[in-house]
Every structure is written in structure tokens, then in C-alpha cells.
Image (cartoon, rainbow, N blue to C red):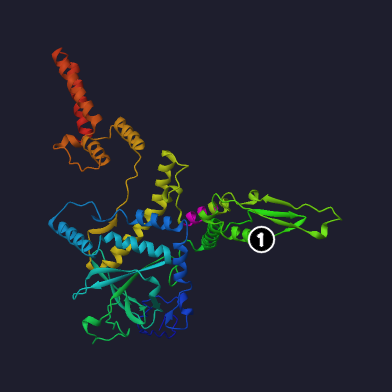
Amino acid sequence: MDEKGRKVRAEIIKCNTIAKSDKPLNMKNEEQEFSEWIAPSLSFEGLKNMVEHSSILPQCISAYKSNIAGFGLEVRYKDDVTDTKELESEFERLSDIVELLTFEYDTKEIFEKIIENRETYGIAYLEVIRNGAGEVVEIEMIENVPSIEKSRRLGEAVDYDYYYKGMKITRKKQFRKYRQNVNGKTVYFKEFGDRRIMDSTTGEYHESVPFEKQANEILEFKLGSGAYGQVRWIGQSLSVEGSRKAENLNNNYFDNGRHTPLAVLIKGGTLTEESFNKLQDYMNDIKGEKGQHAFLLLEAESDSSLDYGDEKKSVDIEIKDLAGMLQHDELFQDYLENNRKKVQSAFRLPDLYVGYTTDFNRATAQTAMEVTEKQVFQPERKSMAWIINNKLLNEYGFEHVEVYFKDPDITNPDDLYHILNVCSNAGGLTPNKAKEVAYNALGEVSDDYEGEWGNVPIAYSKTINGLDTQIAKAADNHDDEIVAIMKSVRALLIERGGA
């Protein structure tokens, strides 16, 4: 009963916890496919052919290879930490794993090939091999990209583990299958991270597959969001094809010419049959050395229909030079140059990186390198390193070390000189830092000076030394008041400087 005498009923309603899906629910583009296996939207062989016959694409792709992965892979600590036996052990273990991922060549060369395939086809594949303990121990480059097909993500989502800062996180994911067809033989692969057992000969999942028939995994590297990626120069495909046709036209001229080199004009008669045959043979054999230092003798017969009585019309033979109509230089030069620039812009590469250096000086070259490093190569290196650390080697659970791609030293010596001058004048340059910069410029490794003085700014040390000298002079002159003041100043500087 409440205060007004009305009846009040209270009821406790129990409900179950509301659960949400633990996997993505959005519809992917590949859901548009009606079959299990997805067909590429473009011909891989056609893309490869365009690259092979292009006058600029190979240089752009080579620049990506050399500047992204060409400087090598190294191992480093994630944070600035003090070495311990545990950290050193983890560092050495990761170094050994990276070094032993392949025995055929340097590990960096595999990633150079991945970049080459990715820029040629829009996608590249890496076959990952595990040992009996399930650890990634070997990688193999799949060079025949057109032979690989992938399926849609089918079946129910399964658990997969991800390691983050030493913690194991379990998520749900749908995996796809891969298959390779070569000369009528088919081999099946799993998507990387799928720990289910697959038969490499049938593509079916079951637990009773013999170890030697268990499928390996494929880790893919692709550009864009399509199922098979998309080359970054796809928008310039017409420019690539047009440049090839222009080059073919120019090249064809050297074999066949483009215009008739001369004209034979006959007035008041006709060539004899023998002269006509000679002229025909001359035109057929004019190519190559046969046409050098040769002369031509033509005979003509008068046309009797043009004679009037006893007066016979003379025959006039004139050879007209048509060399002025011939092609003297390659055609479409502006067209070819513009197409080259368009393709380079798709890669965001300046001329310096593809062999066109006529318009560069030291200042412009330095600027071009700095901009390209920051906007193109550094992001690509970080993206590739992320895949290695967070996918390929994630299950090792390394907490303090990681793999990274080395980059070139593009420091401008003039800029470095000005920076050091400013730091020195402001009193912030220490002997150890000056030594480190100098040794790095020479490509050598330096050790810090022994003693705390190596970490004391040079300007600060000069000030203290100068005060010591003045104090000594004042003491020699028995200026006790000045000595006391200077000692107080010195003590204050040492206190403020932390010396």
C-alpha cells in the first residue's frame, strides 16, 4: 500500500545477457560472385606483357624494389631499453628466425620479388611453411602469380589467435582457400592464420590428413581493395599502350620506311620492259647493304602516238627526289614524354629515381629524395614491416623486438652543419653527441667518452673552465671579494646545470 492507500505490486523480471556477433557482418564485394572461386577481373598475362614492353614501368618498379626492401631487413628493440639477458635472447632469436626464413638467397630478396610482383599484377603471394610445432620457419616466393586462384570466404568463422604485448587475443574470422593450377596439376593452400588441417590435393578440411599431404598457407600482399588487388598504374594503361604503339611506329620506319623515296617521271614515252624490271628489282633490294654505292640505268621508248609526221617526240626521263617527305626523327616525342610523366606520377616518383637526371642539381635532388622518402618509401616500408611483425611472425609473441626495413641516409651535410652550429652556440651540444654525429657521417660506430664530462654541454664546460681561470687570477691578485663572488656564481651554475 502506498501513502494514499493504493495497492502497489513490484515484480523482478530476469533476462538473459544480450550477445552480439563476434565477427564482421558487412557484405564484401566478393559476395557478388556466384561460384566458390573468384575470377580475376583483368588478365594477369596482359598486365605482365604491358610491363615487359613498356619504356618506363620497369624503371618505376625497380625503383620501388631498391628503395623499399633493397637496403635490407634488421632487428631492433621497440623501445629504448637497457639490455638484459632476456632482451638479448629475444633479439638473437628473432635475428636467427629472419636469417633462416630462406636458404636460397638473402631474405630481403624475397620481399624485393614480392614488391615486383605486387606492382606488376596488383597482388603477390608468399607460401609459408611451418614445422611440426606449428612455428613459421620458412617462406617461399610464388613467382607464377597468374596460376593462383582464390575462393570467397566461405564456411563458418573459426578462432584465430593474435598476440599483442605478450597477451593472446582470440578472434573469429572466415578464411578463404587458394589453389594453384599448372599443367593440369592442382595444389590447394590455406589462407595464412587458418590452423585447420587441409588436404593439399583436394582442398578439404579433415583431421586425418597425413603430415606430408597437409596444405601450407599463403600470405598475400596486394594493392587496393579488389579480390586480386589493382596495379597503381591502371589509370595510365592507355598511356602505356599508346607509348608502345608510338614506339612500334617509329621502329617500323627503320625496316620499311614511311614514304616512297623517289619518283620516276617519263614524258613522251614509256619504259622498256627490261628497264621496268630493273627498277622493280632496285626498289625491292634497296634495303641494307645492297643499296649502297649502286647506280640505276633506265632506257625508254618513245610513244609513236605522239609523233607528228616526220617529227618524232623525244623521251624525257626525270627522277624526282622525295627525301624531303621522309621522316627525319621519331614521331610523337611530346606524346611519349607526357605519357612517361603520367606513369611516373602514378608511382609518385621524380625523374631522379628512373634515370632522368638532366634537370637536377644538388639542391633539387636533395629535395626530391627527402620528399619521396617521406611520402612514398617510408610508408611502404612501414606497411611491409607491419605485415611481417603482426602477421607472419606474430605467433612467436615477441614483446620487445621487431623487424624493420633499413632506409638510406639522405642527411644533407650542409643542413647538419647549420644544426650543429646552432646547438653549439646555444650551449646544447655535448662531446658525446658531437662524436656520434661525426662517426655516423663517416659510416663508423662510436663509443661514448669515459667520464661524466662527455655528457656535459661544451659551452657549459667552457663557461665553468673560464670561471676557474678567472678565480685563479683573482686569487693570485688577492682580490678576495671577487673570488667569493665568482665562486658563488660557479656554484650556482653547477647546481643549475646538474653537474
Badge 1 local density, few (<14 within 10 Å), some, or many (20+)? some
Q: Which residue is mark 1?
A: 276
The amino acid marked with disc number 1 is Phe
Residue 413 position within the rendered picture, expressed as x and y whole percent measured from the top left: 33, 37
Image side of residue 266 versus residue 176, left or right: right
Residue drawn at x 32%, y 80% is: 187
Q: Is residue 480 above or below residue 105?
A: above
Q: Splitting the image into 4 quarters, where does residue 208 fall?
A: bottom left
Spot occupied by residue 448 in the image (x, y as percentages of width and height)? 17, 40
Point out the stretch of residues depicted in magenta: 338-346
Q: Nearer the viewer, residue 173 or 364?
A: 364
Whether residue 111 is visible: yes
Tally the numbered discs.
Answer: 1
| Image position of 473 with respect to 251: above or below | above
- Please, which residue is most extreme toward the top here? 477
In what element is the residue under mark 1? Answer: helix
Residue 340 within the segment the image draws in magenta: yes
Q: Give me the residue at 25% from left, 72% from top.
A: 129
Q: Which residue is situated farthest in the right direction here?
A: 309
Q: Main secondary structure of the magenta part?
A: helix
Q: On the image, which quarter does residue 426 sit in?
A: top left
The residue sitting at the front extreme is 310
Instruction: Give x and y (percent) for residue 203.
Output: 33, 83
Q: Residue shown at 68%/50% (left/top)?
A: 320
> Is 43 or 14 nearer to us in this picture?
43
Q: Is residue 16 above or below residue 253?
A: below
